[in-house]
Image: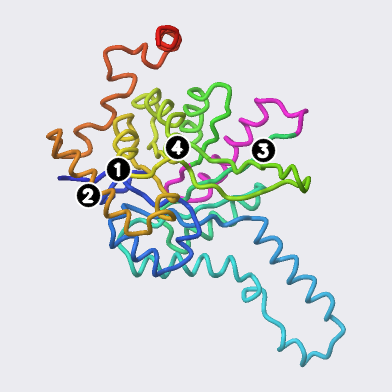
Amino acid sequence: MNLTSTYLGMELSSPIVVSACPLSESLDNIVRMQEYGAGAVVLFSLFEEQIRRENALYQEVMENTAGAFAEAADYFPGADEYQSGTVEYLELIRRAKKKVDMPIIASLNGTSPEGWIEYARQLEQAGADGIELNVFYIPADVSLTGEEVEERYLNIVKLVKSTVSIPVAIKLNPYFSAMGNMAHRMADAGADGLVFFNRFYQPDFDIENLRVISDLRYSEHNEIRLPLLWIAALHGRIDASFAATSGVQGAREVVKYLLAGADVIMTASSLYRHGIEHLATMNKELEQWMQRLNFESIDGFRGVLSQQNIHDTTAYERANYIRIMESARQA
């Protein structure tokens, strides 16, 4: 079976990609991810706020010791040493590129125009094969219009694309009022890939202690349906690579996303649940499914169930909603 797939112009040995998560903080883990069949790895996110805190802390130390003896300066770390998060991230990219053959995609979570430009350039110089822009932005300001929010995303893509020559993907959120149009505009702005969707971590309430709870919940397989819908609806209509994320627990979700038209499928929760070796299981089960249905390659069935390739297109339209409601009444 031929499991190769193309994402952001790069040929991958498998369509299964490790999404951005702390598992990739370890070089040993990255090596194991390749050994167990990952097509690529998206590194954990580099957050601009963390970098700026490091800079601010370094400046505070230097200002508070400005009156010390000159000899004492030798006891304080230099700026590069103090910015350990940034330096370590860039060094991880360099080391990973020497250890593995699969693409290493950096993940950048910025806040300011200067941050997106500066750090994107550093990631490219360190050897990243691509950059995934993780725009974790909640427009809670009630004065912001939908158009202003959309322009923020589009401007980020334009800024980064004008800075680097490596491919750039953007992780979309599912809340744009006109998702199809926004996806089209993202591609026009220069995005080489679209990732469906960013999974916002939403708060919960502790009603006994009256406090807000912020915790990490792994995705569940039923979360596949929203990204599945949009990938299937937009396949073949947008000039960009499609990556699917959310809800991937095994080969079953991988197959569904590929049938919808995804180029790659990203997973992290399944690796936390079952270990990095679960990548090999998913690849094996994908091959077994392909063998049962006589598909020799991923391209042989990619997008087969997308809206543009099925006979009854109402499966993605209002008419299907009406049918579902009618069948519920009859049940």
Nearer the observer, disc 4 or disc 2?
2
Mark 2 in CB contact with mark 1 (< 8 angstroms): yes
For the C terminus, which image quadrant? top left
Disc 1: which residue: 251
- Residue at the outermost right position: 67
* Along the viewing direction, whichever of 109 and 174 lies nearer the viewer: 174
Tell me the residue at 47%/64% (across/down): 126
Task: Based on the picture, tell me whether residue 158 belongs to the magenta stretch.
Answer: yes
Q: Earlier in the sequence, mark 2 or mark 1?
A: 1
Q: CA distance from mark 1 to mark 3?
A: 32 Å
In the image, what residue type sits under mark 2?
Lys
Q: CA distance from mark 3 to mark 2?
A: 39 Å
- Kindly state the secondary structure of the residue where label 2 is placed: helix
C-alpha distance separating marks 4 and 2: 27 Å
Numbered badge on residue 194: 4
At label 4, counting other C-alpha atoms closer than 10 Å, the crowd grade (few under 14, some 14-19, many 20 or more) is many
Q: Quick check: 128 left or right of 32?
A: right
Give the residue at mark 3: 138
- Left or right of 204? Residue 27 is left
Q: Which of disc 2 and disc 4 is earlier in sequence? A: 4
Classify 179 as above or below 269: above
Question: Of the residues shown, which amino acid type is indicated by label 4?
Answer: Leu
Give the residue drawn at x 12%, y 34%.
294
Mark closest to the chain's N terminus, 1 or 4: 4
Task: Report the Cα–Cα distance between label 1 and label 4.
Answer: 21 Å
Q: Position of residue 133 (x, y in %)?
A: 53, 46
Give the residue type at disc 1: Ala
